[in-house]
Image (cartoon, rainbow, N blue to C red):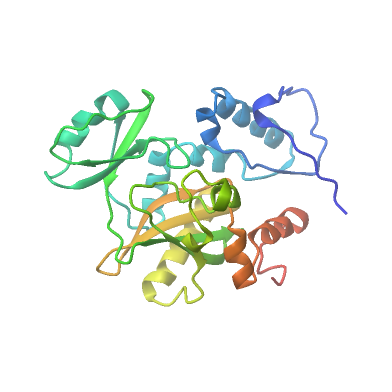
Amino acid sequence: GAKVSRLRLHDAIVDFRTVPEADVYLNRYSPSARWRQRAAADSCAMACLQHLELSGARVISGTSALRLEQSKVAQHAACVQAGFRCPYLVACPRHLASQAVLLWAPKGTNLIVKPDCGGSGRDVQRAVAGTHRDIYGPDTLFVAQEFIESADGTLTRMEFVKGQLLYALKVRIDPGSYDNCPSDACVGGNCPLKRDDAKFAIDTEFPATREDHAAISNAQTLAVMCGLDILAVEMIKDTMGRWWVVDCNCVNTNYNNAAEQKASVSGVRAVADMVIHGKGPLETGE
């Protein structure tokens, strides 16, 4: 069997004179590490990936994926280029976000305001255009975008490995919560929000409509265009039956074990097949 070891990117000393020891490197770095008392983690991760790629190592979710993961503005631009319908967006430093909310959109428009690089719903806030709202959080780049109302109170998260759709996860939207991570560490007894496994279920009927198939095609375009080996796209369907992309994960995604067991699928197995065989789930007969 393959020998697996872990490299902690925020602790790495990157020596560009050395030759990588492993055959394959799987990047699982999350930019939200910067909010967990690791301010240099993003730069360290990028330096490490640049060294590995420069040395000719095979890197899954490399520098192109990490650059996209580090910025919601970059994700928005890429998703629009890929053909997705996305909420309009404004970007500004956090200390100007209140002014943007007051002046940017038609008065009364419901907005979501969040850091350009966030994670797990951190510092995500609701606001109403044309009103004063103090925006809290670090003085970094923030974005404000129109809030999309879900027709049925859920969002759909498409999971891709090597450009192939694994499944669509339907996620219950809990009022007042912006953390929809399906990780097993974020549900059940480990979850400070007291979420439960019922929040997540694989939609066995997806894709069913032309809109569904178009969304899959757009996601595959995004994966090829931006070099994304692993991709999750979060979408909300409005009352007119239109999909809106509200977020995406471009480097590392989490899978909900309970939902996968009920549907007899495994995202981790698909990723493992890609790492070991260099092929996507359909190419390996999964």
**Residue shown at the point (13%, 45%) measured from the top left:** 106
Q: Assign the N terminus to one quadrant of the image.
A: bottom right
Residue 263 x %, y %: 60, 72
Quarter holding residue 236? bottom left
Seen in the image, is 47 located left or right of residue 277? left
Residue 272 x %, y %: 72, 56
Residue 222 x %, y %: 48, 54
Nearer-the-camera pick, 178 or 57: 178
Quarter holding residue 162? bottom right
Is there any visible trace of residue 253 in the rendered image?
Answer: no
Is there any visible trace of residue 212 in the rendered image?
Answer: yes
Q: Is residue 25 above or below residue 47?
A: below
Nearer-the-camera pick, 254 or 83: 254
Furthest-right residue in this view: 1
Quarter holding residue 256? bottom right
Nearer-the-camera pick, 225 or 263: 263
Seen in the image, is 134 located left or right of residue 235? left
Q: Is residue 206 above or below residue 38?
A: below
Residue 10 x %, y %: 64, 27
**Residue shown at the point (47%, 39%) measured from the top left:** 119
Q: Assign the C terminus to one quadrant of the image.
A: bottom right
**Residue shown at the point (50%, 62%) measured from the top left:** 200
Seen in the image, is 63 located left or right of residue 26? left
**Residue shown at the point (32%, 53%) measured from the top left:** 86
